């Protein structure tokens, strides 16, 4: 799945502003951003529900905007809370969706009810369902299509802690079975737990795209170091490339650096025959970075490399 | 088999069967002729100012024809609009458009499946109104020969065929109102607005018909096509109002369908 330069304007509001996203086969891809960042709007364009003001989408090489439903072969998912006909039972709702899918989906109804553990309540009208049951039914509806790419928009939002855990376990299970997943979320922890790649979106723009591990590595974070000879350590730290804002702070030395620079620094300290008592990153780095990226005044002020290494081969 | 118009049509019918709103209209379509027949059985009077009104006590077959005139003012357009105005807008209000438009059916197929379902409902309500009024009318006033509008007497059996044909001719303007209703349903995305919009349109067209100085428009007004069936009840049969009705109704129906289709195809599904 590939989105290039996607733009969506609602009147004078630019909900999505030149978004590029590449999801490769096998990815569990996180689409992370605070509320109102434009996640849902982007996913709607990928599903052919709304027409972009500019840019293009390719899903398995086809264009959902010009080809409509025909381009959604192998793709399933929902945006915001999934909706059903409240006056029909869950099973009837699924049977209807399956009819609209064709492709043998009717034979999968019982299996997907089982997957989301809804068989017992399948004959009750959806009107009486809780939010959590509807979310699960939404996943069931998506699985009917036997998708290769599953698009989920904040599927765990609004669930109680148990429901959230179950939902994440379900997504993890589907991903482990080889499904490609595009998961939008405003929760960093969720994306960190489930995804290997991430696009961070803020005010309609991508401020970071790449592997979560790379994101962590490039984060400039505060570190505290304590050695057996802080006076000498201070000189070495100050001289070390990639380390900045070095100052003594009581028994410790504080500085800012990213992970690779810190690794180099620890080697330098050891070479100088210093004993490292402690080397501690100051904060939960990703959380900080996320806030910095999504709430800072200028998007992209952190020079996060936009990693496009996979764009060349096997784009889903 | 790839899902298409037929798939959507079948599920739209199933949904209509599960909806209360459906039975409201059908109950009216059956209840009005029933109570009319019962009233006639109990009272001597008759509606003299409508075609066939004077014969309601002589032949039961006059009763469905009188009802056609009565029902065209408000009842049948209302029953039709109630479902046609809801059929797309309800999906907007439920947020279910995104549910069906992310499957493998094309938008155009969804639209035409809905159009067919709304038309089917219109036909069913008209059949119900006709069937009940023929049976109840014949029970009350007898399955008797009918006096045609040309003054000749038509045997009961021929009259029955003419009554059935009249309902078929009546379906042309009523079906057109259905198409207008679906168009409003698509454009307004709001069920109540679409129902009211359809009825207001019918009333406005009727109003244009009675405004002084606009009399030349009368033959081209949608509501003036309702009495076209009366051509069948002349001897020999006068086909001209019927063919006229068909092309005038097409002037309303075809643009309504095209407009609804294009809007449905091009629109953003941003709600729900
Ligand atoms: N149908 C719409 N009409 C007008 N503005 C909209 C519409 N949908 C979304 N927006 C605006 O676009 C922005 C992005 O919204 P959305 O994509 O829902 O964000 P997210 O899913 O990341 O919370 C918001 O400012 C929202 O107000
Ligand atoms: Mg959202």
Image (tube, rainbow, N blue to C red):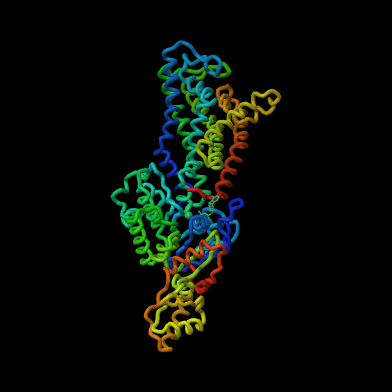
User: What's the residue at 56%, 62% (across, down)?
Assistant: A297
Between residue A118 and residue B257, name the one nearer to us. Answer: A118
Residue A31: percent from the left, percent from the top? 47, 62
Q: Residue furthest left?
A: A120
* B173 in relation to B8, above or below: above
Residue A245: percent from the left, percent from the top? 51, 75
Between residue A87 and residue A226, name the one nearer to us. Answer: A226
User: Taking A269 as reference, is B72 left or right?
Assistant: right
Q: How many dots with numbers?
A: 0
Q: Does the rendering let one see residue A42?
A: yes
* A94 in relation to B200, above or below: below
User: What's the residue at 43%, 57% (across, down)?
Assistant: A154
User: What's the residue at 62%, 31% (across, down)?
Assistant: B244
User: Taking A156 as reference, is B174 left or right?
Assistant: right
Q: Quadrant of residue A268?
A: bottom left
Q: Residue furthest front?
A: A250
* A145 in relation to A285, above or below: above
Q: Does the rendering let one see residue A104?
A: no
Q: Residue furthest top?
A: B44
Between residue A258 and residue A95, name the one nearer to us. Answer: A258
* A89 in relation to A203, above or below: above
User: Taking A167 as reference, is B199 left or right?
Assistant: right
User: What's the residue at 38%, 84% (across, down)?
Assistant: A275
User: Taking A210 as reference, is B226 left or right?
Assistant: right
Residue B140: percent from the left, percent from the top? 41, 17
Residue A231: percent from the left, percent from the top? 45, 83
């Amino acid at each position: 799945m590939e989105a290039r330069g996607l733009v969506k304007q609602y009147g004078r509001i630019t909900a999505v502003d030149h978004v590029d996203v590449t999801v490769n086969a096998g990815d569990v891809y996180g689409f992370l951003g605070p509320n109102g960042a434009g996640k849902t709007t982007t996913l709607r364009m990928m599903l052919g529900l709304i027409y972009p003001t500019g840019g293009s989408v390719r899903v398995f090489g086809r264009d959902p905007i010009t080809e409509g439903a025909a381009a959604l072969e192998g793709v399933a998912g929902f945006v915001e809370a999934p909706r059903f006909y409240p006056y029909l039972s869950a099973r009837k709702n699924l049977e209807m969706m399956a009819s609209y899918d064709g492709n043998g989906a009717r034979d999968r109804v019982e299996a997907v009810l089982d997957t989301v553990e809804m068989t017992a309540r399948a004959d009750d009208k959806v009107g009486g369902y809780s939010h959590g049951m509807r979310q699960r039914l939404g996943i069931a509806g998506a699985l009917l299509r036997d998708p290769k790419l599953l698009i989920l928009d904040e599927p765990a939002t609004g669930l109680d802690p148990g429901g959230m855990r179950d939902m994440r376990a379900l997504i993890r299970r589907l991903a482990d079975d080889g499904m490609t997943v595009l998961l939008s979320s405003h929760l960093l922890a969720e994306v960190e737990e489930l995804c290997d790649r991430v696009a961070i979106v803020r005010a309609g723009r991508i401020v970071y795209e790449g592997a979560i591990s790379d994101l962590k590595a490039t984060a400039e974070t505060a570190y505290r170091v304590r050695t057996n000879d802080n006076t000498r350590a201070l000189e070495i730290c100050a001289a070390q490339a990639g380390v900045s804002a070095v100052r003594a702070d009581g028994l410790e030395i504080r500085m800012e650096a990213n992970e690779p620079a810190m690794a180099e620094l620890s080697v330098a300290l050891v070479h100088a025959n210093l004993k490292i008592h402690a080397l501690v990153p100051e904060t939960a780095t990703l959380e900080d970075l996320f806030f910095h990226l999504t709430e800072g005044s200028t998007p992209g002020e952190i020079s996060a490399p936009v990693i496009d290494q996979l764009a060349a081969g096997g784009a889903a | 088999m790839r899902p298409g118009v037929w798939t959507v049509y079948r599920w739209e019918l199933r949904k209509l069967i599960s909806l209360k709103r459906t039975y409201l209209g059908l109950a009216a379509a059956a209840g009005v002729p029933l109570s009319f027949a019962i009233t006639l059985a109990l009272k001597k009077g008759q509606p003299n100012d409508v075609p066939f009104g004077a014969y309601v006590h002589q032949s039961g077959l006059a009763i469905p024809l009188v009802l056609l005139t009565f029902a065209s003012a408000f009842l049948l357009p209302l029953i039709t609009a109630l479902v046609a105005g809801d059929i797309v807008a309800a999906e907007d209000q439920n947020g279910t458009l995104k549910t069906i438009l992310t499957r493998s059916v094309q938008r155009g197929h969804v639209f035409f499946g809905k159009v067919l379902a709304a038309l089917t409902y219109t036909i069913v309500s008209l059949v119900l109104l006709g069937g009940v009024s023929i049976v109840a009318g014949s029970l009350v006033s007898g399955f008797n020969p009918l006096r045609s509008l040309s003054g000749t007497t038509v045997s009961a059996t021929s009259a029955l065929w003419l009554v059935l044909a009249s309902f078929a001719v009546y379906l042309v303007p009523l079906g057109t109102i259905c198409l207008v209703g679906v168009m409003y349903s698509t454009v307004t995305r709001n069920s109540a607005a679409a129902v009211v919009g359809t009825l207001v349109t019918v009333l406005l067209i009727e109003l244009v018909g009675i405004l002084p100085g606009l009399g030349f428009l009368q033959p081209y007004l949608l509501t003036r096509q309702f009495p076209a069936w009366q051509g069948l009840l002349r001897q020999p049969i006068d086909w001209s109002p019927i063919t006229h009705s068909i092309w005038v109704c097409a002037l309303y129906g075809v643009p309504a369908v095209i407009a609804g289709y294009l809007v449905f195809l091009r629109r953003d599904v941003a709600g729900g």
